[in-house]
Amino acid sequence: MSSGPQKALSEIQLSESASREIQSFLSSGERFTFLSADGTTQLQGIRFQHPEPKGTIVIVNGSTESWLKYGELFFDLYHHGYSLVSYDHRGQGLSPHLVQSNPQIGHIDDFSFYADDLNALVQHVLLASNHGKLYLLAHSMGGAVSLDYLERFQSPFSAVVLSAPLLRINTSPYPEPVVRLLITLLKTAGMGDHYAPGKHDHDPAESFEKNPITSSRKRWEASQLVWKSHPDAVLGGPSICWVDQAMTRTELIRKNLSKIQGRILILQAGRDQFVMCADQDSASKAIPEAALLRFPEAKHEILMESDSIRESAIQAILTFFKN
């Protein structure tokens, strides 16, 4: 195992030499492509092969994201002895975007495509060569994708961690039935690939003080630098069809949670504004081998949070994968 920090990087370190180390490490990864499950799209991935791996962690990112923003997490997990594989979902990040009129619109025709693509990664990348013991770590929408995958496919993963998983969209301040009706009307009117109401292009001038994802200024600034450096990977908000599909698919996922096999740890962000925490509580009870770990002060991006929260989360992940 290569040498490295025993604890996760701190916010202070991010402003010093470690930030350059992270970028150098990210550049050292092996980029690859694989074909989407329906054969329409070349998806972009990256892997880091540890010389003496404890196993391989597959990281499934959230809506509007890219593996580009996970440099610090990759760095930490690698230096704890794991090989890593990640990729960008169709329609976002470095994979082809799906709305030609505005590539910043996060769009999908069928939410189940995401889990189909994760299965394509498993079959054609992970199982096609020796990646050792396999683990799954997913964030937000990636959590919904992973649960959908676990419900529908034979899983090779020894353990799964879901960080702030999407099980139900937070539609506040509007009731969910009202939002569903509006979305259905707009989709029926042929506006499925337009922005959902209230959503827009990425705003590079958005202030840290108003951000809903993290209380760590350093990690917020690092993520903004990623998008500034990679404008082609940037997404704004979701499309009308994406919201429609996400609401429909997560409802089905919630109904089938009891079918999921394997060890699962759910990390819950107490100050989450994007997803409903109550459904994570329910999921931890419905899934036979699930546990729930609460971070009451965390915003949605637990793994981008302030040091005390992030360090506790990473240690919990490492302990769960080790057991």
Image: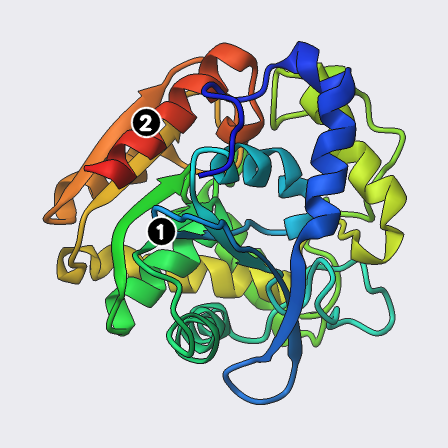
Taking 148 as reference, is 206 left or right? right
Taking 227 as reference, is 114 left or right? left
Q: Residue at x 83, y 48 (%)?
A: 201
Q: Residue at x 14, y 47 (%)?
A: 286
Taking 157 as reference, is 109 left or right? right
Residue in the foreground of this view, choosing between 97 and 169? 97
Q: Residue at x 16, y 49 (%)?
A: 287
Q: Which residue is mark 2?
A: 316
- Residue 22 x, y percent position in the rendering: 70, 34
- For the N terminus, the image quarter is top left
The reply to whether residue 252 is visible in this rendering is: no
- Residue 140 x, y percent position in the rendering: 48, 44
Q: Tell me the amino acid under the disc marked 2.
A: Ala
Q: Is residue 286 above or below residue 203?
A: below
Q: Which residue is mark 1?
A: 55
Mark 2 surroundings within 10 Å by alpha-carbon count, few (fewer than 14), some (14 through 19), many (20 or more): some
Q: Tell me the amino acid under the disc marked 1.
A: Gly
Image marks 2 and 1: residues in contact by CB distance under 8 Å? no
- Residue 307 x, y percent position in the rendering: 54, 13
Disc 2/disc 1 C-alpha distance (Å): 17 Å
Mark 1 surroundings within 10 Å by alpha-carbon count, few (fewer than 14), some (14 through 19), many (20 or more): many
Q: Which mark is residue 171?
A: none
Identify the mark nearer the N-term, 2 or 1: 1
Q: Secondary structure at mark 1?
A: loop
